Each structure stands twice: as C-alpha cells, then as structure tokens.
C-alpha cells in the first residue's frame, strides 16, 4: 500500500480494520476517541464484520471485552487516563481470566489536578495488573504494534491481555508519514484466534472465573508470572516474523548509538525520538552518549536491559509520571537490571513532561550535561520554577 | 496438592458439575433439623435453599445433605409449617 499521512489514532483504527476483530466495545475518551470513531465508521460502512458494542462506561467496556474474549471472540478496546482508571477493577481480572484482550491506550495524565494532556501516569498506575505492555515512538510504530499485539497476547504460551501505548496528542493527533501493510499480509500475519476452552464451545462445557482458595490463587498467580516470562520469547519471535512482512526491525530494548557510549538515557515513547536527536547533537561534539527505549515494558525485559547498560559509566532514566513518595517506575525497573552487574553504572532519575509539559531537546541535553559534568543527582524533578 | 503445571489456566473448571465432589459444609455453626410430623412436603425449603442441601426423594422432603449445608437457616424461615429448627452444632 502507498504511504499515508495519518495520525496515530487513525493508524491504529486502520490496523484494526485490517485485522477485523470479532468484537469491539469502547467508551469515548480524549485522546483515544478517534480510534473508536474511525473504527465505528468501518463497522457502519460494512468494511469489517466486527460486532461493535456501545457501552455506558469504561468499566462496562472492559467487563464486556473480558466476557467476549472468554466466549472465544477476538476482542479489542481502547481508552486513556480516567477511562483506564475506571477500568482498574477489571484490569487484573481480565489478565487472571487469561483473556487476551487487545487495548490501545492513548497515554494521558491522570487527574487531578484536571489535565487532559500527555504523560504516562495512566499506564504506570496499571503496570502490575498482568497486562503485556508495549510502547511506540511514532505513528508507524503505533500501527505496527497494533498489528503485532494480538499475536503476542493470544499465543498459547502467553494468553494475557495487552496494552499498546501511544503518547496522547503527540502521536494520537499529530499527522505523520506512515507505511501501512497490505490487508492480506496483515490477515495472514495475525491469523485466526484459537482460544483455549472458550465458553461458547458447548460440546465441551467449562466454567470460567471460579472462586480460588489460597492454594489455587497462589498457583494461578504463578502461572501468570510464567506466562509473562514467556511473553519475552514470544514477542521476540513476533518482531522477527513482522520484519519478514514489513522490513521493519524491532527489538525488546531499542538502543541508539550505545555500542561505545559511556552515558546513556533510558526513555519511553515519543520522547525516544527527541532523545535520539540530542544524541546526534552531542555525538557531533564528540561526546560518547546513547539512548535506550524498552519497547516492551511488561514483561520487563530484564536481561536485555542489563546487556544494554553493561559497561556504561552512567544512565539517566526519564519517568513521565509523578511518583509521589518514591522514585519513578521506569527508574526502579532499570535499577533492578543493574543489581547483579559488576561495576554497574550510576543511575539517575529524571521526572519530566508531566501533564503535557513540553519535553524539549534543550531539556534533554541538560541531562547529558549533568552526567558528563558529574553533577547528576539521584532524583531530579525537571523544570520546576524555584 | 496439584502442581501448578497441571492446573487449567485462568481458574477454568474443565469438568462441569464438580461442586458435587467438593465438601463445603464444614463452616456451619447451626444445623437444620426437620420434624417429619409437621412437614407437609411443600418443597419451599428445597426451592429456597441457596445451596442444594435439601434432599428430596419420591416427592418427599427427607432431610439435609450436611456435606453442603451452610447452616444459613433460610429453609427454617421459608418453611410455612415451622417444621425446621436450627440447632447449634
Ligand atoms: S440451612 Fe441453609 S444451606 Fe442448610 S439446608 Fe437450610 S437453606 Fe440450605
Ligand atoms: S418447607 Fe417445611 S413443610 Fe415444606 S417441605 Fe420443607 S420442611 Fe417440609
């Protein structure tokens, strides 16, 4: 297909159209709304066979999606911010029921104070709910992740729901150039949903969502831990297969100019692009710097992150959410990957970009300058006027 | 105990009707006792029991399945003849 000028939300809706899921239930919330708006156009125009269900809230949306996935239907939804927060009660239930629902999350600040702009506070608050989580740097990746998501979630070694995260407004609403795949390639890449023990298999009746005593609860949780670990290998395989149909190569932990780098910055989402530009700028000045993005955030790609950080002098970890009373979530994750490293790099936490505050190349440059001058602090809340 | 590897994922019960095999009547503090003299076999207790602990045979109410009765006393309340008494265990 020819290249398109398209925003991130519409790119995701296009991927969904090409996949043609069985069921979609969602409730509109900015900056995700365009995804379901476009997709409901496709439904209304008969371009997909999806059963689109209008619901009265996000809680109902995810409840319906969990049930429909249990029944054996490939099920998609999308949300953001307060919508994700409103789904919260269902998030760990969807994963514990092992229903591989695909959800696009247009990352937006959690109120309050009331704010609808981009940061990662919604995703970070949901990070330990048993969902696989991937992030995108640009619109192309938003589309590509949407195509790959069902393959990861539905794999029988995983069977967990997945969140495909994109930065609200920065990617959801900004128009970029994007190369879509042919619909037939998407169809054959994604394949059919083969659910394990679906409720609608009435020849083999089963019960889903039963009550667990401590012994069983404990073991079911451990099964989920193993399934999450399996998602590492499965995601790598899906990335590999995706390269065959797209020519685009993805890694669990993306590295930019890291081979000989002494100082690196770890960042998620669209800021990775900004960080790479800053790396170029500093490289031109002879500074040995690099950038890293964990494309797969849950499961945490521990070994891959350790490998990426080996031999570095220092690492700055940027968190786009406000950890009130602790360090940033990404920082804490990166630190776990440094634990068994000999001569581990020093690790610094930078909080940035909250509630849509601009994250500029100039800001990011100061992070490297701090590290190069040996002046970086363990914790910096960037850009607060004294 | 079952190894986690042999358990169906997601808390799925792959054989329906398994609750018959599991005894769940051991946290009762009161037990229902029926007086057959007063009972008119109206089946109210059988309908109202939230478990399946009222035993009916040949259209006659013949007693309680103590491996499933929770001692909730609903049957005693529902009985129009006050034929059921809740007795402390
Ligand atoms: S006490 Fe409750 S559980 Fe037991 S037989 Fe009566 S209604 Fe059923
Ligand atoms: S409700 Fe009372 S009268 Fe009716 S069947 Fe039960 S015990 Fe007998």
Image (cartoon, coloured by chain):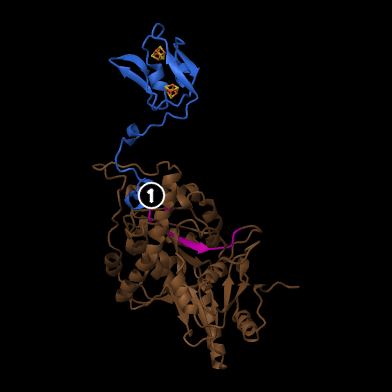
Report the magenta residues as a range. A95-110
Q: Residue at x 34, y 69 (%)?
A: A238
Residue A5 is covered by the magenta coloring: no
Instruction: Using the image as rendered, state which of residue A92 and residue A1 is in the foreground.
Output: A92
State the residue position of label 1. B10
Instruction: Using the image as rendered, state which of residue A275 and residue A27 is in the foreground.
Output: A275
Figure check: A314 above or below A172: below
Local crowd size for mark 1, using a 10 Å CA cut-off: few (<14), some (14–19), many (≥20) = many
Q: Residue at x 42, y 10 (%)?
A: B35
Q: Residue lying farthest right?
A: A386
Residue A14 visible from this viewpoint = no
Which shade is chain A? brown
Location of residue B25 in the rendering, given as x and y in whole percent from the top left corner:
42, 28
Judged left or right of residue B34, residue A151 is left
Where disc 1 sits, the SS reads helix
Dot 1: chain letter: B
Q: Residue at x 29, y 75 (%)?
A: A244
């Amino acid at each position: 297909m020819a290249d398109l000028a398209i925003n991130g939300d519409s790119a995701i809706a296009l991927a969904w159209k090409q996949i043609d899921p069985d069921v979609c239930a969602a409730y509109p919330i900015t900056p995700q709304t365009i995804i379901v708006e476009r997709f409901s156009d496709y439904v209304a125009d008969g371009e997909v066979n999806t059963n689109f269900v209008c619901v009265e809230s996000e809680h109902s949306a995810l409840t319906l999606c969990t049930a429909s996935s249990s029944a054996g239907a490939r099920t998609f939804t999308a949300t953001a911010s307060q919508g994700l927060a409103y789904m919260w009660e269902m998030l760990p239930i969807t994963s514990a029921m092992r229903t591989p629902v695909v959800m696009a999350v247009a990352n937006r600040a959690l109120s309050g104070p009331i704010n609808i702009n981009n940061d990662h506070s919604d995703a970070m608050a949901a990070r330990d709910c048993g969902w696989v989580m991937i992030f995108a740097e640009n619109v192309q990746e938003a589309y590509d992740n949407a195509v790959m998501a069902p393959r990861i979630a539905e794999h029988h070694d995983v069977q967990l729901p997945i969140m495909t995260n994109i930065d609200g407004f920065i990617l959801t609403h900004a128009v970029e150039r994007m190369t879509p795949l042919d619909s037939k390639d998407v169809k054959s890449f994604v394949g059919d949903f083969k659910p394990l023990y679906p409720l609608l298999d009435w020849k083999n009746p089963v019960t889903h969502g039963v009550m667990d005593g401590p012994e069983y609860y404990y073991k079911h949780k451990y099964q989920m831990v193993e399934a999450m670990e399996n998602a590492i290998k499965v995601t790598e395989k899906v990335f590999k297969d995706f390269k065959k149909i797209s020519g685009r190569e993805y890694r669990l932990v993306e590295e930019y100019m890291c081979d000989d780098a002494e100082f690196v910055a770890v960042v998620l989402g669209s800021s990775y692009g900004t960080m790479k530009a800053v790396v170029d700028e500093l490289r031109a000045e002879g500074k040995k710097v690099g950038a890293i993005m964990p494309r797969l955030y849950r499961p945490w790609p521990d070994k891959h992150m350790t490998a990426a950080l080996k031999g570095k002098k220092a690492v700055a970890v940027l968190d786009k959410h406000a950890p009130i009373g602790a360090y940033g979530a990404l920082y804490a994750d990166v630190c776990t990957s440094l634990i068994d490293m000999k001569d581990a790099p020093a690790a610094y936490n930078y909080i940035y970009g909250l509630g849509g505050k601009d994250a500029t190349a100039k800001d990011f440059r100061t992070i490297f300058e701090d590290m190069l001058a040996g002046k970086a602090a363990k914790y910096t809340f960037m850009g607060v006027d004294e | 105990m079952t190894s986690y590897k042999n358990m169906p994922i997601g808390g799925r019960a792959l054989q329906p009707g398994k609750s018959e095999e599991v005894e769940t009547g051991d946290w009762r503090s009161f037990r229902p006792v029926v007086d057959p003299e007063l009972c008119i076999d109206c089946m109210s207790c059988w309908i109202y029991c939230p478990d399946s602990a009222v035993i009916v045979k040949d259209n006659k109410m013949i007693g309680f399945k103590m491996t499933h009765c929770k001692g909730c006393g609903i049957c005693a309340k529902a009985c129009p003849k006050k034929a059921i008494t809740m007795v402390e265990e």
